[in-house]
Amino acid sequence: MEAAWLYYYEDRTQNEIAGSLGVSRSSVATYLQQARAMGLVEVRLAPSLFNTRIVARDLQQKYGLQEVVVAPGPEGSLDRVAQLAARRLPDLLEAGDWLGVSWGQTVWTVAQKMARRPIDDLSVVQLVGAMRTPYGFDSTNCAALIASAVAGRVVNLHAPAILSSAAVADALRNEEIIARQINALSEINKVIFAAGSVEDDSHIVLCGIATPDDLREYRARGAVGMVCGRFIDRDGNHIEGSLDPRMIGVLPQTIKGLSVGMMVSVGADKIQSMDAALQGGYATHLVTDLPTALGILGLGNSSP
């Protein structure tokens, strides 16, 4: 009891206690273990300090993920989440990898926060065609900025994300240079992407890929979210509609089952989409914030 009092109440070191009691340090360690076993000492943790770790573990177990990183902070803490993703992504890359890069504000913010860290023989592949956007976060810029950070070779997709008609899109896909770039999409073994919303204020509308009427059509077909510019249902299945024949870019099934699928997303409007992407098996790694993570767990559905 004396050893426990000195250690836990007076904050003395085990060496100091050993000297005071005239015993060895190993004896002090044994006394402390006995004190806990006898119930003389209780060690309590403040749950609020471990919320992010607990939630990360729960998400990892629910969806069978390799890793989950949950940032503390208020809802929509994109900068903090992007910083965590920017630090983690290079650790997951190796020489010879083909990294697929999606588009959007989240991926762009991650790219902006990546410190330069060259990786040998790395190819960075643009997954979605180009688009008109005043925001800077189109697929071309996202891929270029990440490639610059890791000193990778950029494989661009020199075609619009959406064409005026299916016939024009087919003709463009058959052009030799575009065909080679589309074939490169199947080479990727790792990917970074964000889950997209299907609400009328989604970036896919702001960037001119879809209209609110298009979104209503896909929602009527069961769409709850987007992955790499394509619509998915609650189970993560690709939903095809009137836009798909006109689109140029990666298909959702291409990014399933990769060795690394890093999904980075935050916000209440992304919760259903994130859950659908996780159910669909697109992600192996998840980076988000605490409110969003709790929202996903609160959906209460079963794991895939």
Image (cartoon, helix red, strand yellow):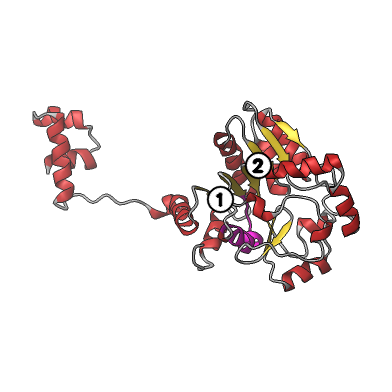
Choose between 78 and 256: the one closer to the eye.
Answer: 256
Q: Does 87 sit above or below residue 295? A: above
Q: Which residue is mark 1?
A: 73
Give neighbour class at mark 2: few <14, some 14-19, many 20+ (Cα, 10 Å): many
Q: Which residue is mark 2?
A: 188
Residue 218 placed where, x, y %?
Answer: 75, 68
- Left or right side of 270 for 160: right
Q: Where does the magenta region start and end?
A: 264-278
Quadrant location, the N terminus: top left
At label 2, which amino acid type do we have?
Ile
Does residue 44 show up magenta in the picture? no
Residue 297 placed where, x, y %?
Answer: 51, 62
At label 1, which amino acid type do we have?
Gly
Give neighbour class at mark 1: few <14, some 14-19, many 20+ (Cα, 10 Å): some
Q: Check contact, mark 2 vs mark 1: CB within 8 A.
A: no
Q: Is residue 66 visible?
A: yes
Q: Judging from the image, what secondary structure is the residue with disc 1 in?
A: loop
Q: Nearer the viewer, mark 2 or mark 1?
A: 2
Report the residue at 22% width, 34% height from top: 12
Residue furthest out toward the bottom: 220
Residue 64 placed where, x, y %?
Answer: 48, 54
